[in-house]
Image: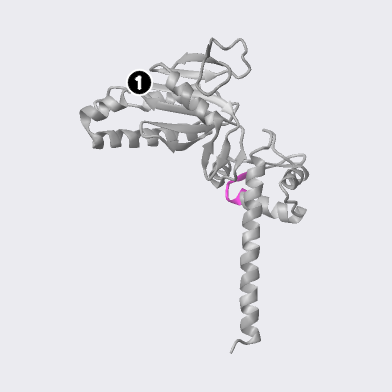
Amino acid sequence: MVTDATTAGVTNNVVLRYCRRMKAALSTDVLLALLDAPDRGLGGAELQVLLGAHRRRPRSDELLTALLRLEAADHVMVDRGDRLSFCLTHKGRARAYELGGGRPVHVRLLMADLVGFVAFTDAHGDEAARQVAGSLAGAASAVLRAHGGEVVKGLGDGFLAWLPPTVDPLPAVLDLAERCARPTGERWRVRAASHVGSPIRHGGDLFGGDVNLVARLCQEAAPDELVLSRPDGGSDATEHLAIRGMAEPVPVTRVAIR
């Protein structure tokens, strides 16, 4: 027989689980909303408006509790100056990308790969190639974190990553190139490309035309070269590349990595 006390206990557990899910959902929404925040961060009222645009408008006390919880987790940095303002930490930005959400996000995409990897594999075998790929993955992850970004996915002999849109990718690529050594000690030659765009973020991955473009620009790069897109077609562009799938040639600048 089910007693009233048992029923009450089950009901309380259901309510508790529901409240926990609601708190987690609010924290997720806050992280995703702060991805769109300007460098100065957002005030609480501004953040409420932004959340409202995504059909969630929490009470002020609920929002503040969520923000303080995220601060304790090192996901949000709180500026307690003249007014409270909130922005993502590097850890919080990486967590927001990991959570996904199927929304476009403004980032600098970076793709790079090792020149001659297929020939190396043919000469030295799959196990040697696996070790090289593992070393590249570790080096890329450390370099991107040091420059404020994150590796999205490894591609065997290369990777796709993001950086904040205002970050110059060249120092990161130079840093990576210095760390890419063959088992014999000889350096690997690297080719890379970078493009600022708004790919779709979902499940920790990035999708869309901007990702396709940076991959094709990477294919256009010569050994030890970084190809940078110049969407505004400004004076920094040194040439215009005809890219498959693009209606117009893409203005780019080529930069030597070494």
Residue 252 colored in magenta in the image? no
Q: Can you see residue 11?
A: yes
Q: Position of residue 168 (x, y in %)?
A: 55, 23
| Secondary structure type for disc 1 | loop
Q: Amino acid at mark 1?
A: Arg
Q: Position of residue 9 (x, y in %)?
A: 62, 78
Picture quadrant where residue 101 is located: top right
Q: Position of residue 193 (x, y in %)?
A: 48, 23
Q: Is residue 130 left or right of residue 249?
A: left
Q: Is residue 1 above or below residue 195?
A: below
Looking at the picture, tell me which residue is in the foreground, 141 or 110: 110
Q: Is residue 249 above or below residue 114?
A: above
Q: Which residues are magenta?
A: 71-77
Question: Residue at left 63%, top 39%?
Answer: 35
Question: Residue at left 25%, top 34%?
Answer: 128
Quarter of the picture containing the C terminus is top left
Q: Position of residue 253 (x, y in %)?
A: 52, 14
Q: Is residue 72 above or below residue 34?
A: below
Q: Residues within 10 Å of mark 1 (few under 14, many from 20)?
A: many
Picture quadrant where residue 59 is located: bottom right
Quarter of the picture containing the N terminus is bottom right
Q: Is residue 117 above or below residue 138?
A: above
Picture quadrant where residue 220 is located: top left
Q: Is residue 82 left or right of residue 19?
A: right
Question: Mark 1 highlights which residue?
Answer: 189
Question: Residue at left 74%, top 42%?
Answer: 43
Q: Can you see residue 77?
A: no
